[in-house]
Image: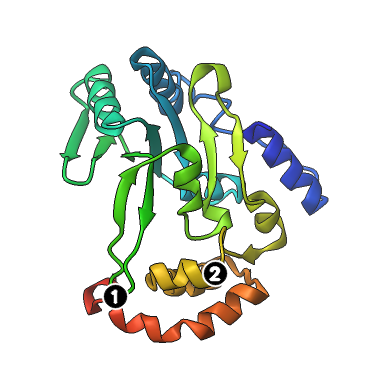
Amino acid sequence: MTIQDAIQEYDSFRKRKRQTVSPFETPPKGGRGVLHRIGEMADALGLECYVVGGYVRDIILERPSKDIDVLVVGEGGGICLAQALAKDLGRSAHVSVFRNFGTAQLKWRDQEIEFVGARRESYQRDSRKPIIEDGTLDDDLHRRDFTINALAVCLNKDRFGELIDLFDGLLDLEDGIIATPLDPDITFSDDPLRMMRCIRFATQLRFQIEEETAEALKRNAERIKIISQERIID
């Protein structure tokens, strides 16, 4: 399924006719579009890359979104791709590298693009700071907070626009549901900040919290106290 197919399927769920133009398929006038350029550069470097998370969610919901998260499979691939793309885009592109986290941020025109490596995470009971290891695309999508944020779209040329939806996030978008990709007790216990994000998404998007996810919120409420005041304010 491509992102265009996904949007068309979403439209059929809504039972309303309208024309959908996907930025994943149609570059803006006067250029290839930054997503196409990312994919081309990834191909040149032999890297596998995807746009993930909130940008995909918001495109399907037709909400404005300028911040793009790009997931790159392979150790050091995110930084490598960001630096190569910045060089290709020229002086108007500015890249910041955060080697301790294996990430890079590229600012170009009015867009901010975050490049990260695929990873898997594990947690200790008394901390919300994860133990991070390099991982696969599947590993990275499994660690996501909610199904609607666990969607990925391939940017490589041969698969450009292909939607990866391991947890039926598209159906949850259509149904207006907030649910976790894994056992919600594990999701919230590992990182209690996700409970606050759950409530925020439900409020902002006017979605319903899935029943078992709502029960897990109650069961894990005490875990909120391990979050620092600064993180709560953020």
Nearer-N-terminus badge (2/1)? 1
Q: Position of residue 221 (x, y in %)?
A: 44, 84
Q: Position of residue 66 (x, y in %)?
A: 41, 44
Amino acid type assigned to the residue bearing label 1 in the image: Asp
Q: Identify the element where label 2 is drawn.
A: helix
Q: Quadrant of residue 207?
A: bottom right
Q: Residue at x 57, y 55 (%)?
A: 148
Q: Residue at x 58, y 28 (%)?
A: 161
Q: Residue furthest right?
A: 15
The dot on residue 77 is none
Q: Nearer the viewer, mark 2 or mark 1?
A: 1
Q: Identify the element where label 1 is drawn.
A: loop
Relative height, residue 215 to residue 198 (above, below): below
Q: Position of residue 63 (x, y in %)?
A: 54, 51
| In contact (CB < 8 Å): disc 2 and disc 1 | no
Amino acid type assigned to the residue bearing label 2 in the image: Pro
Relative height, residue 175 to residue 36 (above, below): below
Relative height, residue 146 to residue 24 (above, below): below
Q: Residue at x 66, y 49 (%)?
A: 170
Position of 115 compared to 50: left or right?
left
Along the line of sight, the residue nearer the viewer: 56 or 31: 56
Q: Which residue is mark 1?
A: 126
The dot on residue 184 is 2
The quarter in which the C terminus is drawn is: bottom left
Q: Residue at x 31, y 84 (%)?
A: 225
**Crowding at mark 2 (Cα within 10 Å: few <14, some 14-19, many 20+):** many
The quarter in which the N terminus is drawn is: top right
Q: Quadrant of residue 183?
A: bottom right
